Image (spheres, rainbow, N blue to C red):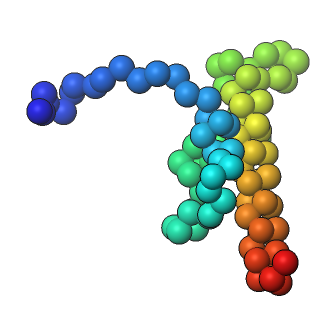
Amino acid sequence: MCRGKWFHRPVEPVDVVQQIRPRPATGTEPRSGEPPFAVVMAGYVVDFHHRNACSRCRPDGSCARLADAGATLRAWRDRRVQWELRARRDRDGR
């Protein structure tokens, strides 16, 4: 049932870091080889903060957006390291 292009259903807030953490049941890397959209956007947030301050930046230099982006990127890097270690272990036959 289509209600037009302006109809949006409510979306529940989701913790982005929890979305990209590895799930115990599956350990396979995505086939596309590209990071998830949330990871790409986190990279843009970090890049923006290297050039400018956003509206939520505090005078001491801390920023909640930058902290969230950093957590997202750290979780993605940890997951990639786990994939690489698992692939190396499987390749070596251990």
Determine the residue positioned at 88% across, 18% down: 60
Does residue 76 lie above or below 54 as drawn? Answer: below
Residue positioned most to the right: 60
In this rendering, position of residue 62 left or right of residue 55: right
Residue positioned most to the bottom: 92
How many numbered marks does the figure carry? 0
- Residue 46, image x and y in percent? 72, 41
Q: Do we see residue 46 in this rendering?
A: no
Write down the quadrant of residue 11 in the picture.
top left
Q: Do we see residue 74 in this rendering?
A: yes
- Residue 33, image x and y in percent? 58, 67
Q: Depth check: give the residue in front, 42 or 17.
A: 17
Q: Quadrant of the C terminus?
A: bottom right
Write down the quadrant of residue 55 in the picture.
top right
Q: Quadrant of the N terminus?
A: top left
Determine the residue positioned at 78% across, 60% down: 82
Q: Depth check: give the residue in front, 18 or 62.
A: 18
Write down the quadrant of residue 15 in the picture.
top right
In this rendering, position of residue 68 left or right of residue 15: right
- Residue 61, image x and y in percent? 84, 23
- Residue 9, image x and y in percent? 30, 23
